[in-house]
Amino acid sequence: MKNTVTFILTLSLILLVGCQKKNNTSGFSGRLGIVLDSSVPEAERELIDMDLFRLSEVNLNSASSRDLQILGVQAFSGNQLTSWLRTRVSFIVGEDFDYGEQANIVGTQTYRPQIFSASLLNEEEIEQNSLITIMINIGGALYRYGKRNNQVLTLDVGGQRVYVKSPRVGVIQIGEGLFSAWSVKSSARDALANSLIRLSVFFHEARHSDGNGDNVTFPHAICPDGHDYAGNYSCDSAANGPYVVDSVMLRNLRNACTGCSNTEIQTFKSFEADALDRMLPGSWDKDIRPEQIP
Ligand SMILES: [Zn+2]
């Protein structure tokens, strides 16, 4: 695990964002109303659709009151969990989706009332070369880019043109590791265990659709010296941040893994431990309410 698996949200948005480009995307309406962009290869689309169906069927009685508090739900039922996810994820795009090509600047906007710290997104500091990307919340990253540059962006995705006016725009992109590094390698891609493990990533990315002010999109923090991911933006300073959400989901989804092998269960546990280890000492619960511009 060490130094091999991470999620990134922040990415170098050295965008060649232009104007008046043609909307040439198309998509497929998947389960829960989440649109799968045509950039998602058919085999992956079928797997993700199955993952979302499996989520709708779960009933996780193992959730603690703290788990419920972190997600802000009354129960970890299929209904409530899918509703939580649908609020934060509207589109899933494939690895080849070119956000630079599909994003447009359509206006200027001073982002108020929240005060934005310029130090939040320092592109030069974001180097993830040695790490594998599992998924990226590009909707959140584009929102931050617009906010930093006082620009309103649109994104053409899944056959629609969406205005990036909130971190809740909810566009997540599949990374190179979703179907490989972040899985039980000895199990099939459509095995229940791998479905449930992938779902934990969707919840991680969904938390990046929350937040306001300096904490908009719940950006990751740099891991300190001595940490497995020292020097990378692979830790959290929020006790309800993406990695904690990830660990909560892994622990509970593990209980839905009926008939799963010992190897599969151990993989859940090892990913959960890895996620938990990324919460920095002194972390606290941060405000999840999403901001938006008019
Ligand atoms: Zn993340």
Image (cartoon, rainbow, N blue to C red):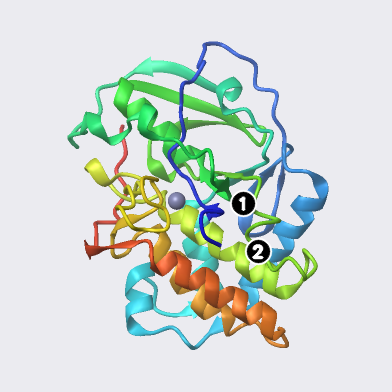
Q: Can residue 3 be seen in this view?
A: yes
Secondary structure beneath dot 1 equals loop
Q: Nearer the viewer, residue 203 or 87?
A: 203
User: At which x and y percent is residue 263?
Assistant: 68, 80
Occupied quadrant, residue 189? bottom right
In the picture shown, does residue 288 fall above or below 294? below
Q: Quadrant of the N terminus?
A: bottom right
Q: Which mark is residue 90?
A: none
Q: Does residue 132 lie above or below 228 as drawn? A: above
Residue of label 1: 34
Q: Does the beta carbon at disc 1 come under 8 Å from ligand 1?
A: no
Q: Mark 2 points at which residue?
A: 52
Q: Quick check: 250 above or below 44? A: below
Q: Quadrant of the C terminus?
A: top left
Please rate how many residues cluster around mark 2, counting C-alpha atoms within 10 Å: few if below 14, some from 14 to 19, many from 20.
many
* Labels 2 and 1 touching (C-beta < 8 A): yes
Q: Helix, strand or loop at disc 2? A: helix
User: Is 263 on the left or on the right of 237, as rendered?
Assistant: right
Residue type, mark 1 in image: Ile
Would you place residue 10 above or below residue 154 in this image? below
Which residue is located at x 58 percent, y 50 percent?
134
Residue found at the far front of this picture: 226
Residue 50, x across and y down, in percent: 73, 64
Q: Which residue is drawn at 44% across and 65% down?
A: 275
Residue 273 % position (x, y): 46, 72
Q: Residue at x 53, y 69 (%)?
A: 271
